[in-house]
Amino acid sequence: MASSGASQGTGTRQRLEHIDAMRPIKQAAVISTHALIFLVPAAAVTSQTNLLILTHFSREAFLFVSSCMLAYGYRELSRIGSRLYWKRRLMAVGAPYVTWTAIYFLFTSLVVIHGFPFYAVHGGMILSGAGLLRLGNLLVSGYYHLYYLIVIMEFYAIFPLLLRLVRRFSAHPVRLVLVALAWQLTNAVFWPDIYSVVTRLHIAGATSQSFWESRLVTSYAFYLVAGIVVAMHLKDVHDWIVSHRALILVETVGAAATAILLNLVHFSGFANRLLHAGDDPFAIIVIPYVVGAIMCVYLLGVYLVDPQRSVRTRALTKSGSDNSYGIYLSQMLWIPMLVRLHEHLFSWVPWPIATVAAVIIVYSLGYLFSVVMARTPVSRLVTGRARASWPSLVGRRRRAPGAPDVADGPLDVGLVS
């Protein structure tokens, strides 16, 4: 379990298998968050809020992993070639973002009807001027969960500057992280005041403050800077996390319990900003849990790709990582459909069971969708990955001498010759 899991390669082609393995885990947390939001009844709002405290870390984990993987790919390079850099970023994020914004625009333009299939096409809502205006608004602000990609693009814009900054102070990585943490804490405490000033100056519209907070890269500074620093000092950080796994687990459980317990207490004034999470995923009180949860998922990733694991386990982990982007992008096709089914046919099912079932079903549908679409000409646009061949779905049954015994496709169990 001591291996850092880096595979051989140069530049942006380097792959960190154990960090890649974090992707499907955090996608399960993302789906859990949305399932809780849509399926928990109003009468159970307290339970919903407390459970969301446990699942919302996926947002920060998503950005930490993206930051770490990108920085690791460039850590040996003296400079970043802007043309190639942006070509890759736009293909990986920009193209899927535009594609899925169009897909969700069409999906949300469907008219809800009674009875199966619960939706009907209304062309007037799509082709009208109001429809085109709504499409433009979606592209600018991000449909529901797609705002993650807006934040990532903001991060890509400042990444070269952040990378130079981290290199400039490479002898003081802890101080850099502490400065970023101080920024994170300050932003969490004073964002309501900042937003109030912004709206009074008419810089932003009168939408909810959480809407804009979630879409600004400044709201995630700590996790993005930490990702770059970890990439620059990966071996040292890896060794520390692995050697302190018991402490990390205890800290994570304790931090989660503290945040949930304090969430049950009513505070007033400034103390409420410090000690009460409510439905605010940026609240100060949840930061210790989020950090601990990210490290726990890191440890789970290390465990899953360890050579001691079975070939099947590592094959499924790699396939889950490869298809996690498609799962994330497509999830909001499946969740609304399940909500409709639940309302019309399965309303008698208790919400805890319905929520767990929804997570499993949505993850499975997203996985199968990604597996299939990744083998079509629109793979780049829909799944954000290079097109895979249909034979790779099963994988090679015989491998060249010295080839890794990790599967090529989701149905491959890694048989060796």
Image (cartoon, rainbow, N blue to C red):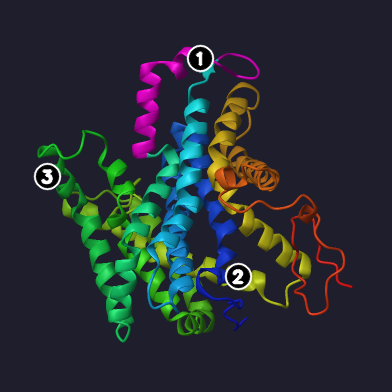
Residue occupying the point 45% across, 55% down: 87
Using the numbered discs, state the Cα–Cα distance from disc 2 to disc 1 in whole angstroms: 46 Å
Please tell me the numbered disc located at residue 148: none
Front tag of 2 and 1: 1
- Asked if residue 31 can be seen in this view, the reply is yes
3D distance between C-alphas at marks 3 and 1:
41 Å
Q: Label 3 belongs to which residue? A: 197
The x and y percentages for residue 125 are 45, 16
Of the residues shown, which amino acid type is indicated by label 3? Val
The residue under label 1 is 123
Q: Amino acid at mark 2?
A: Glu
Tell me where the magenta segment starts and ends, as one range: 113-141
Residue carrying label 2: 17
| Horizontal side of residue 17 vs 311, given as left or right | left
Viewer-side residue, 12 vs 197: 12
| Element class at badge 2 | helix
Which quarter of the figure has residue 413?
A: bottom right
Q: Callout 3: helix, strand or loop? A: helix
